[in-house]
Image (tube, rainbow, N blue to C red):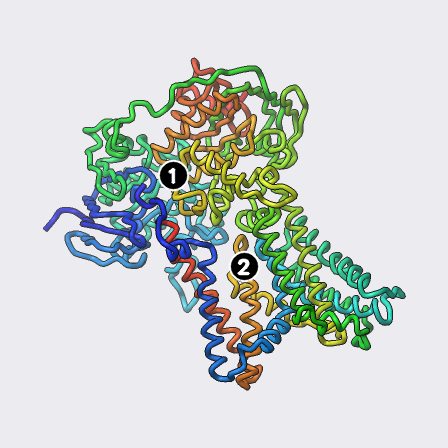
Amino acid sequence: MKSLKENGGGFFQKLKGSKYFELSGLVCLIIVYSIIVQTRSGNFLTMGNINNILKEIVVYGILATALTFPLINGTFDLSIESTCALGGTCCALLVTDGLFGIKTNLFMAVVISILICCLVGVVNGLLVSRTKIDPFIVTLGTQTAVRGIVYIVCNNSAVTSLPDSFKYLSSGKVAGVSVSIWILLLDFVLMALVLGKTSYGRKIYAIGGSYLAAYISGINVKRIRFSTYVISAALSCIAGILSTARVGSATPNAASGYATIAISACAIGGVALTGGKGLTIGVFMGALMMGMITNGMNLMFIGSNWQYVVRGCLMVLAVFYAQWFSKISNKATNK
Amino acid sequence: MSDFILEMKHIYKSYGGIHALSDVGLDLKAGEVLCLCGENGAGKSTLMKILAGVETPTEGEIYINGRPVRITKPIDAFNEGISMVHQELVQIEEMTVAENIYVGRFKTKAGFVDKKALRENTLKLFEELDIFFEPDSLVRQYSVANRQLIEIAKALSHNCSIIIFDEPTAALTIEETEKLYRIIRRLKQKGMAVILISHRMEDIYAVGDRVEVLKDGENSGTLRVSESKVDDIVKLMIGRTMTQQFPHKTNQVGDVIMEVKNLTNSKISNISFDLRRGEVLGVAGLVGAGRTELLRAIFGLDACEGNLTLNGKRIVNQSPMDGLKRGFALVPEDRKDQGLILNQSILQNIVLSILKKMSAWGIMKPKKETVVCEEYIQKLKIRASGKNMIVQMLSGGNQQKVVLGKCLASKPEILLLDEPTRGVDVGAKAEIYKIINDLACEGISIIVVSSEMTELLGISDRILVMHEGYLSGELSMNEASEEAIMRLAISHEAVG
């Protein structure tokens, strides 16, 4: 066959054929944006500011990873932001006034909050995998319901006067870098390993690519689908705890609207909303881009209203680029 | 002035440096049925997509009635009187028959769709074709065959003079195919020119006037149907004579490995048969006779009542996981939807059923995967640039081989094949038949469901015939013939 000649090209050919090629557009965007902000403000690319950006993206970066599992699996999770608030609130209550009379140390508080949030994941997972209700509707429902539970649990008021050990999660530094940034990086590395190197990751991609084909190939589609929601909830909880640590208090309306930011980060990073496609490094760059927009425009003294406009435009632009590069990539592999 | 209604000259089409078509020509007279043949990847579909405006040629000229035309969009093709009935039907399932036919061209009355005119026009079209469907019924309730007829009516509604059929009979039963032949002859009588893309010799001899053969993106030759033999056409298609499409059967049929007793669910009734080691058991019947459902029930995809005995042990497969664990594997009818993860690589598809074996503590072992994958690429002669090629880019035949590879990787004892050669070109078909024979020789028992009777007669050791969910008969190879199968397939006094 003519069209299937061995692909013997050089480095560029190889790059074009690789699955990372699609991200080139995003890389270009990040570079161009950095240069523009750097020339306008001068201190965008300093170590201190990069640290700021990373610190900025901790919460919605982790939320984006939480969302990536259901997304690649071909479903959706809108409840992450409420689960995030629930995790932060529960954890704060456990170390201060007590949650239903239980007071614990920080470590136990984290464990218990994650378990509580996993229950949300269990409800989502059961409803999505066992019924035919659209995941969008299911998680829209839990998003609303869980937000209500958060208000009930913290009795309509913010949880304050957190111990220093709690705040250390955000302000503390290991090797000159904040603990929260280490957690963020660890989260991404773990996700990269799980999605890229394990059979579990393969199954997630396969189900997202074709639910029926995966089922006929002997994959326990329901169990995997269920598990992605539990993972999603657990990661949301961690994001919530770090958010609380950063602000120094747990407010019941914390993380409102963060689901949208997480979706944007995933979409910019090349995760297909139809499932079966997406790379961890892409999600990371997507989250980074979101942080850079806010940070860079603050440095250039551009107000938050314009930041929304730019964020919206860039998201569409990034997805457009990704598709364009993917087309070139397909042609290259087709040679 | 030429007497050709359509001429395509020096058509080139390349995708990023690869020539899909080079210097291809085609001509067509009014009232002529031209069959376009060639192996998958020969460029037939590309050529027709160019004519229908779905693709634009890199170079080339198209003349309609001797007048040069530019076709860059589907709408241009409609305006030039060209309509195409696509292989994968593009219909809006939630709309009615009439709405589907006239979608985008509704006659309106004061801004609202004129339902009465819509209905009347649709009925008029059906009358012309001598078919009938209720215009106000939803499209999704009709079978593939009927939807195809609706699609033909839609093509006709564009007042076209050239109509292109892309493998129309691939999914049809014999009766439905006959009906389609009648309609094509009728279109021809009305002075329309028809281009028929088909792999099937039956189609060519039933309705064709002339055959144009493409090979590797070039014209291979043109023949008058009345003056040529099957071998002549096949020779042009593959560049050699294929004296024998089916391999010489060498498998040894052993002892009974599986007994099926009174298998029943909503689609199949009381099916009982047994299967022997190394046997190729054909299952024939009309579309809708429950053949696919029988395979699905055995595999564990659909719930059923009744007994399955495998190697003397009673078993119940409640899910594909159960089926695979017990040594069953299914090659489904619809490979794009059910067989493959289209956006993933050959390797990822082949190891899909054996992820557990390809990993340790949940971590994939790339070296082990590569070995298994290369083994099946070689064994099944999958033609691709490498194991990392995305399966979407492969031709139909190679895609089917990937599905087969995935099933074989799980080392099945019983292989269930549902229409294994649908939409696969002649060359790849012969290869698949050979693979089936080889597997039977290795002692694998195979159940093949197929709508092509010649295929079943060529590869089976025994044939079961189904009719409306019942087993209407069993034929040994001495008794089996197309007539015998057909008699059982349409019989009303089913056994059992």
Q: Residue furthest left?
A: B1
B50 sits to left or right of A325: left
Q: Which residue is mark 1?
A: B383
Q: Say if B364 sits above or below A327 in the image.
A: above
Q: Quadrant of residue B238?
A: top left
What chain letter is assigned to the residue under label 2? A
Closest to the observer: B276 or A271? A271
Label 1 and label 2: CA atoms lie apart by: 32 Å
What chain letter is assigned to the residue under label 1? B
Q: Which residue is mark 2?
A: A273
The kind of residue tagged 2 is Leu
Residue shown at 35%/37% (left/top)? B180
The local secondary structure at tag 1 comes to: loop
x then y, percent, for residue B99: 43, 55
Question: Could one spot residue B172 in this view of the protein?
Answer: no
Q: Residue furthest bottom?
A: A301
x then y, percent, for residue B11: 22, 50
The local secondary structure at tag 2 comes to: loop
Closest to the observer: B311 or B231? B311
Are the numbered discs 1 and 2 placed on the same chain, yes or no? Answer: no
Q: Quadrant of residue A230?
A: bottom right
Q: Say if A316 sits above or below B339 in the image.
A: below
Q: Residue furthest front?
A: A175
Q: Say if A297 sits above or below A115 in the image.
A: below
The kind of residue tagged 1 is Arg
